[in-house]
Image (tube, grey):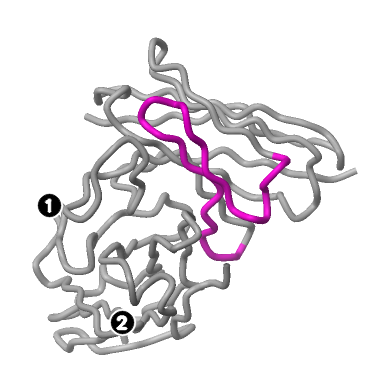
Amino acid sequence: QSALTQPASVSGSPGQSITISCTGTSSDVGVYNSVSWYQQHPGKAPKLIIYDVSYRPSGVSNRFSGSKSGNTASLTISGLQAEDESDYYCSSYTSSNTLVFGGGTKLTVL
Amino acid sequence: EVQLLESGGGLVQPGGSLRLSCAASGISFGAYAMGWVRQAPGKGLEWVAAISISGDSGYFADSVQGRFTISRDNSKNTLYLQINGLRAGDTAVYYCAKVGASRYCNGDSCYFHFDYWGQGTLVTVSS
C-alpha cells in the first residue's frame, strides 16, 4: 500500500489561509469517507483534528476544515496563527483493510 | 481524562523480540477498537496494526505481517504488540491509539481514525 501524497511543505503568513492536499487512489481516499487529519508538534504525539473527511473533534478550532473531491482530500487552515506551525498528516482506510498515512506536510507560519 | 501509557520499548538486537504494552485509563477500553502506529526517527507516521473490539480480529500493515501480533486483555484495559524478527527498519517510536467513532463505519472491526494517542515508546534495533 503506497503512502498518500502530500506536499512536503507549505507556508503562510499570520491571518492567511492555507490548504494542504492529500492525494490517494480509488482504493482509499476515493472510495471511503474515512479521511482524517492529524497535527503533530515536534516531540509530541499526533493529535486528531479532522475525521470522516470534514468533522472536527470537540475542542478543535473551527479554523480547521476538511473536504474531499474524488481521490484528493484537503485540509484548510484559516486565520493562520503561530501555534499552527506543525507537521500535518492525512490518513485513509483502504480496500485492503489497512490504514495508510500521507508522508506529512510541514507548515511554516512566516 | 483518557490516558494511554505505552511501555516495553528498548534496545534490541536484530532478530530479537519485544512485547509492547499499552495501559488505558479514562475510557471503557472494551468498547473500542485499538491500534498501533509507528514513526521512525525523522520520518512520517506509519500504521502498524489494529485489533477489533472483541480482540478476535487483528489487521496488519504488509511491512509487519507475519512478524507482529496484536492482542488485548479487556479485563486489564491493556493492549499489546508482540514484535518478532526485529529489523533495523523497525526502529521507531511506537504509539498506541484508540479508534474513534465514525459516522460511516460501525461494528467490531472499524478503525477509520484514532482519536486518542499515547506518548509512545521507542524501539531501537541495533547490534
What kind of secondary structure does the magenta stretch mostly adopt? loop
Residue at the spot x=59%, y=65% of the render? B43
Instruction: Tell me the subunit letter for badge 1.
Output: A
Q: Give the numbered dot on residue A85.
A: none
Residue at the spot x=41%, y=70% of the render? A28
Q: Residue furthest right?
A: B127
Q: Is residue B80 left or right of residue B34?
A: right
Q: Residue A33: x and y, percent?
A: 25, 66
Residue at the spot x=57%, y=55% of the render? B39
Q: Residue A15: x and y, percent?
A: 14, 85
Q: CA distance from mark 1 to mark 2?
A: 22 Å
The residue that label 2 is drawn on is A109
Q: Residue B73: x and y, percent?
A: 46, 17
Disc 2 marks which amino acid?
Val
Residue at the spot x=62%, y=33% of the render? B69
Q: Quadrant of the C terminus of chain B?
A: top right
- Identify which residue, B111 or A78, lies in the foreground: B111
Q: Residue B30: x and y, percent?
A: 32, 22
Q: Is residue A9 left or right of residue B12?
A: left
- Residue A110 magenta-drawn? no
Q: Residues within 10 Å of mark 1 (few under 14, many from 20)?
A: few
Q: Quadrant of the N terminus of chain B?
A: top left
Secondary structure found at label 2: strand
Q: Are marks 1 and 2 on the same chain?
A: yes
Disc 1 marks which amino acid?
Gly
- Identify which residue, A96 or A74, lies in the foreground: A96
The residue that label 1 is drawn on is A59
Question: In the rendered picture of this protein, how many numbered marks are placed on residues?
Answer: 2
Q: Which residues are magenta?
A: B42-67
**B22 is higher (above) or lower (below) than B119:** above
